[in-house]
């Protein structure tokens, strides 16, 4: 069997050591869950019939609720003999983090939003792109190759893909590159350059080989992330408020400045939060495998992701309100 080990927040856990997984939520597929519901009451009273009808309608709406579109899908997979590889076309987003590629295996996945193909050579651990972060892949460890869609020219105008590691986030459009990810990440970039954003020192334009070392403090990286995520969210809300305001519009120059600020905050948030999540994901993997990288770990990927979701909330939610998707 091919296996992925997934952690919160996306709610699926698969054991790779032969032990039974700990359930994290409903395990009955939505498509068949309604068939297990209690049948409507046969009482002749109008109130009972109304209640039964309402229950049936609710059950039907749950059963037919649309699934989010796939964000990262399997393009190809080669697994060791005697084990089952992922199937081409499988959506990797629901698997959570960390997902694993075992030693001797390779997995290529396509990022739906950008068309890039990311190939992992095991052993590797990562989190695929998700509906909430469709253009960001988080890598804790392993050999990674990133390629634009086939036939893309180096000067083509493509949407950027972000690949987060514990030391930096790589941003690339039409340029292929390779990463050897861990406590120290080695980047190998062919011409022209790829941009690498770091949590502490801004952005670097890299050609050739370059090393990125993991930040000393995961807590400090996460703190930067929370600040940037909050700023990004606030700027986005301000833009929407201006667009919906029925009063006199702001001068076009002011709107343009706000747009520039929004793009800057989004980039900083993507960098800081990408590094923070990769840092904590490496902590999860290193602690579980008893390998290098467990020192200085004071949190988990799940706790870091929950902090990021909280920072992006537009307002405080009333007590008892369910958390947004991916925050648990």
Image (spheres, rainbow, N blue to C red):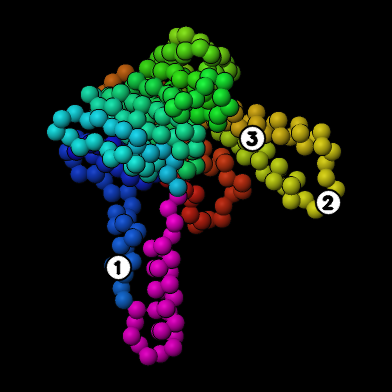
Which is the main secondary structure of the residues drawn in magenta?
helix
Residue 112 at what x, y percent from top left?
46, 38
Mark 3 and mark 1 lie on one chain; the one further toward the N terminus is 1
| Residue at 49% across, 42% down | 132
Residue at the disc numbered 2: 247
In the picture, the disc for residue 123 is none
Residue 155 at what x, y percent from top left?
57, 20
Question: Alpha carbon of mark 2 to alpha carbon of mark 1: how far?
Answer: 52 Å
| Residue at 34% across, 41% down | 89
Mark 2 and mark 3 lie on one chain; the one further toward the N terminus is 3
Q: Which residues are magenta?
A: 40-68
Give yes or no for residue 327 being in the magenta stretch. Answer: no
Give yes or no for residue 50 being in the magenta stretch. Answer: yes
Please identify the quadrant where the C terminus is shown.
Answer: top left
- Asked whether 7 or 197 is in front, the reply is 197
Residue at the disc numbered 3: 231
Residue at the disc numbered 1: 35
Mark 3 Cα shell of 10 Å, populated few (<14), some (14-19), many (≥20): many
């Amino acid at each position: 069997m091919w296996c992925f080990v997934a952690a919160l927040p996306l709610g699926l856990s698969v054991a790779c050591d032969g032990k039974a997984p700990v359930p994290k939520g409903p395990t009955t597929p939505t498509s068949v869950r309604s068939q297990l519901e209690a049948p409507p009451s046969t009482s002749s009273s109008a109130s009972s019939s109304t209640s039964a009808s309402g229950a049936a309608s609710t059950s039907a709406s749950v059963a037919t609720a649309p699934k989010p579109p796939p964000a990262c899908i399997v393009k190809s997979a080669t697994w060791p003999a005697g084990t089952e590889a992922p199937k081409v076309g499988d959506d990797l987003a629901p698997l959570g983090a960390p997902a694993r590629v075992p030693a001797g295996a390779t997995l290529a996945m396509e990022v739906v939003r950008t068309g890039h193909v990311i190939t992992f050579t095991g052993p590797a651990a990562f989190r695929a792109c998700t509906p909430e972060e469709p253009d960001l892949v988080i890598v804790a460890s392993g050999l990674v190759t990133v390629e634009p869609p086939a036939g893309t020219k180096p000067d083509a105008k493509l949407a950027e893909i972000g690949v987060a590691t514990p030391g930096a986030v790589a941003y690339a459009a039409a340029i292929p590159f390779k990463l050897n990810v861990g406590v120290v990440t080695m980047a190998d970039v062919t011409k022209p350059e790829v941009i690498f954003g770091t949590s502490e020192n801004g952005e670097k334009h890299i050609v050739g080989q370059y090393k990125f070392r993991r930040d000393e403090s995961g807590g400090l990286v996460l703190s930067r992330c929370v600040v940037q995520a909050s700023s990004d969210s606030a700027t986005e809300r301000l833009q929407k408020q201006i667009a919906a305001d029925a009063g006199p519009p702001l001068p076009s120059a002011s709107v343009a400045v706000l747009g520039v600020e929004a793009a800057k905050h989004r980039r900083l948030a993507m960098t800081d939060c990408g590094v923070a999540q990769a840092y904590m994901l490496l902590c999860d993997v290193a602690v579980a495998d008893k390998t290098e990288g467990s020192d200085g770990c004071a949190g988990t990927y799940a706790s870091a992701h929950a902090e990021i979701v909280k920072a992006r909330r537009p307002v405080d939610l009333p007590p008892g309100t369910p958390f947004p998707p991916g925050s648990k």
